[in-house]
Structures are given as structure tokens and as C-alpha cells.
Image (cartoon, rainbow, N blue to C red):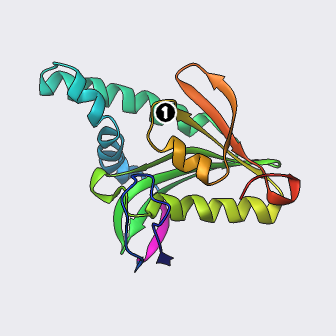
Amino acid sequence: MSLSCTDSSCGSSCEERPLRLALRPIEAGDRELLFRIYASTREAERQLLDWAPAQWEAFLRQQFGFQHDQYMVAYQNPSFDLVLLEDEPVGRLYVDRRDDEIRVIDIALLEEFRCRGIGGRLLRTLIAEAETGGRFLGLHVEKNNPVLNFYRRLGFQEVVDRGVYLYMTRLPQHQGGAS
């Protein structure tokens, strides 16, 4: 895939560069990698707490286990994939496909692979899939997540305020959605 990160959520200016992205379904042997991806998304939170490293890791493993187990049973038509860059695992993309909606359950990249346009490329692929099928694309995002403005630029609109999270959707263009 050719990848451009001109819409980077990190706000940095990135060069256009060819990158080979692929998805691979997660496997039982991926659990430790999936934990590392999950843990990398909680780094800012860790820095706010004065917890011993062992205490923090035990907490994260517990939270990851709860989240992972819930994701595996909560959706009717999910795909749980690793994101591969040049065949190297760099993140995860979990999606539930419904008749009227494609729901992004989770999209997370290891810290060193953020702000390279990978997430934007994944979302644009899902936007195209949703457009083709006449479905809307939905996701939840924490209100304080810096990616929120990027989602807005992609045409997502806030639909429901769920406390810490916003539920956002992007309607297909032919149904009045933004581009």
C-alpha cells in the first residue's frame, strides 16, 4: 500500500512514503504482543501515577485481560487483526461489521509507529468499505484523546456523549456525511 500521512493526528508534517501494510487475524500465541500494544496506549496514564513498576504491570495485565475477554464475546461479526508494517506487527485493529454500521472496536499502534499515517490509512480503508456498502462508520474515543480532531477532519461527528467517551459516526457521503 502507498501511504501518505498528510492528515496525521500527531500534528507533525510527514513525508509521503511507500509502506506495505497488511492485516493478519490474531492467534492464541499473539497474547503477549497484544498486551504490549495495549500497555503502550496507557503510558501517559502511567506517568501520572506513582506506582511501582510491578504494581503497574499487574494492573495493566488485569485490565488487558478483562478488555480482551470482553472483546472476544461482545460482538456479533468481529474481525480481530494485527496490523503489520513490512510484515512486522505494529498494532491491532478490531472491527465489528453490522448490516448498517462498521464499528471500530479498537485501533491501537505501538508508540514508535504512531504519527506515521498508519492509523489514517487504516481508517480511510474502513471509510471506503463503509461507503461502498452504504453503511456508517462508528467508533468510541476518549474526550481527551488527541486523535479526536483527526477523526473530525475525516468527517466523524459526535453523536453520543458517554461520559469519558464520545461515540462518533461518519455517514456515507450519499447519505449526507462529510468527506
Q: Quadrant of residue 76?
A: top right
Q: Which residue in the structure is indicated by mark 1?
A: 69
Q: Secondary structure at mark 1?
A: helix
Left or right for 67, reference 171: left
Magenta span: 19-25
Residues 110 and 58: in front is 110
Q: Quadrant of residue 53?
A: top left
Left or right for 140, reference 69: right
Extreme-right residue of the structure = 175
Q: Is residue 35 above or below residue 111?
A: above
Q: Is residue 46 above or below residue 51?
A: below
Q: Amino acid at mark 1?
A: Asp
Residues 168 and 71: in front is 168
What is the x, y in percent for residue 11? 40, 54
Residue at position x 56%, y 27% in the image: 165
Q: Is residue 96 magenta?
A: no
What is the x, y in percent for residue 47? 21, 29
Q: Is residue 113 above or below residue 152?
A: below
